[in-house]
Amino acid sequence: MNQNDNIVTTAILTDAENMAKLNNQIYPKEWHVSPEYLKKIIKRNPEVYRIYKTRDDIKGIYGFFPLTESNYHAVLEGTLEENEIADYILDYSQSKKVYLYLITIIVDIYDDNRKEYASKLIKDIPRELNRLKTKGITIKEVGAFAVSADGEKLLPKIGFEQQKGETIKLNNHKYPVFRAKTENILENIKI
């Protein structure tokens, strides 16, 4: 395969099937999503998912969900669950001040080129944050929780901090919550 065929781009409706396939291949059953759910999100705000796409497949995904302050805190506290969040995602054309929830950073861990995919996706994050800033979007804070040991190691490396003892309890597990200011992410990810 020609490396020029591999790109990081914004996901569109027709990508939902392969996005769900990758998500469900990597994550345990309690984190599986349907293509229909992904399509609902993309229809609500077509700018939320970025994907690493090869000629044949989707090899990585990350997504920022723009939310109001109260809904953002509800997600990170576990009172607004991920399967309900689609109805609360803001449209950038109508909301200029947002809190971003980093819903996922995922790569095909079974592919030999997984490190390349992860690197390209992570290096795209500052580009995406700057693109939103150029559109006049004010990002108040970015938050996430880590559902894997790899996520728990990655988030601090890209500018997130775990607030003292802050966790979220979902599916009978506790997960650490991380928060970041946009500047911290931009400082920590070198393009």
Image: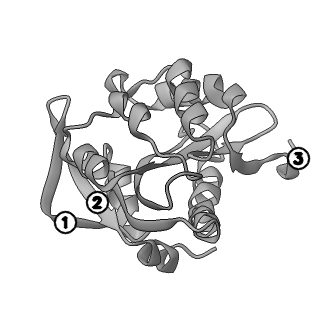
Q: Estimate how packed mark 2 is, as few (under 14), some (14 to 19) or many (20 or more) residues with alpha carbons within 10 Å.
A: many
- Label 3 element class: loop
Residue 69, x across and y down, in percent: 30, 56
Q: Do the residues bearing badges 3 and 1 touch, measured as CB atoms within 8 Å? A: no
Residue located 64% across and 39% down the image: 59
Residue depth check, mark 3 versus mark 1: number of the one nearer the observer: 1
* In-front residue for pair 135/22: 135
Q: Do the residues bearing badges 1 and 2 touch, measured as CB atoms within 8 Å? A: yes
- Label 2 element class: strand
**Occupied quadrant, residue 165:** bottom left
Looking at the picture, does residue 17 appear above or below residue 73?
Answer: above
Looking at the picture, does residue 153 appear above or below residue 91?
Answer: below
Tell me which amino acid carries mark 3. Asn
Tell me which amino acid carries mark 1. Gln
Residue located 45% across and 24% down the image: 33
- Label 1 element class: strand
* In-front residue for pair 89/186: 89
Disc 3 marks which residue? 2
Residue located 19% across and 66% down the image: 163
Left or right? Give the position of 19 relative to 145.
right
Residue 136, x across and y down, in percent: 58, 68
Tell me which amino acid carries mark 2. Phe
Residue 180, x across and y down, in percent: 35, 68
Looking at the picture, does residue 66 appear above or below residue 190?
Answer: above
Disc 2 marks which residue? 178
Looking at the picture, does residue 39 appear above or below residue 144?
Answer: above
Circle nearer the N terminus (3, 1): 3
Residue located 61% across and 47% down the image: 47
